Amino acid sequence: MNKAILFNFEVDRPKNQIKVERSFNAPLDIVWSAWTEAEILDQWWAPKPWRAETKSMDFSEGGHWHYAMVGPEGEKHWSRADYLKIIPQAFFSANDGFCDENGNPNTSLPRNKWENSFSGQGEKTLVNILLSFGTLEDLEIIIKMGFKEGFTMGLNQLDEVLKTLNF
């Protein structure tokens, strides 16, 4: 099996979007679980030395994922993804943004919409991610916060987690 990993990261400033295309050497059902189950998300979502810690998750339309990025000194930065549409093992969308420990939005930081599409290709899975921002300023804030570097690290960590899952 070809182990080459596809990775494209494009910032589309005229549309206030980030487009990410990433392949994984695992079947669709396993990759889908890694993106939609808190126990697996917590293993890869935060870039090391940070870690993700789920407070609550209801992966359903109208549900949400409330989690913290926990730093090496124990500091927590809270986020919340509100699920909009889910097509099992094919697509989900969510509005995502920073919040407080109780899930109340942090209005001083931008929110964005995630649209994640999954397609199985035998023992590989392709994930297309589209992040849309309300303004170019919001997009630039997230880029300056290190989104590309942090998300790339998380996706690479997902590769390692997938190797430990049975399929």
Image: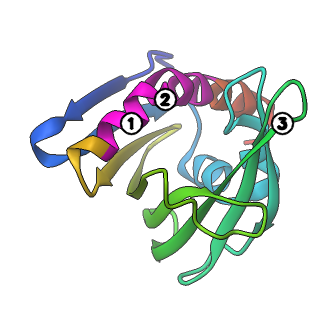
Q: Is residue 152 above or below residue 88?
A: above
Q: In this view, does 122 lie above or below 58?
A: above
**Pointer 1 residue:** 141
Marks 1 and 2, how far apart at CA: 6 Å
Q: Residues within 10 Å of mark 3 (few under 14, many from 20)?
A: few
Query: SS of the residue at dot 2?
Result: loop
Q: Position of residue 52 (x, y in %)?
A: 77, 42
Residues at circles 1 and 2 in contact by the CB criterion of under 8 Å: yes
Residue range corresponding to the magenta coloring: 138-156
* Nearest the eye: 5 or 107: 107
Using the image, tell me which numbered label, if any, was put on residue 145. 2
Marks 2 and 3, how far apart at CA: 17 Å
* Nearest the eye: 66 or 57: 66
- Residue shown at 63% from the left, 72% from the top: 64
- Residue shown at 59% from the left, 37% from the top: 26
Query: SS of the residue at dot 1?
Result: helix
Residues at circles 2 and 3 in contact by the CB criterion of under 8 Å: no
Q: How crowded is mark 2: few (under 14 residues within 10 Å), some or many (20 or more)?
A: few
Amino acid bearing label 2: Met
Characterize the magenta stretch by its predominant secondary structure. Answer: helix
Q: Position of residue 83 (x, y in %)?
A: 52, 72
Amino acid bearing label 3: Glu
Query: SS of the residue at dot 3?
Result: loop
Amino acid bearing label 1: Ile
**Pointer 3 residue:** 75
Mark positioned earlier in the residue sequence (2 or 3): 3
**Residue 142, magenta (yes or no):** yes
Task: Tell me, yes or no, if residue 166 can be seen here.
Answer: no
Q: In this view, does 88 lie above or below 45?
A: below
Q: In this view, does 97 lie to the left or right of 139?
A: right
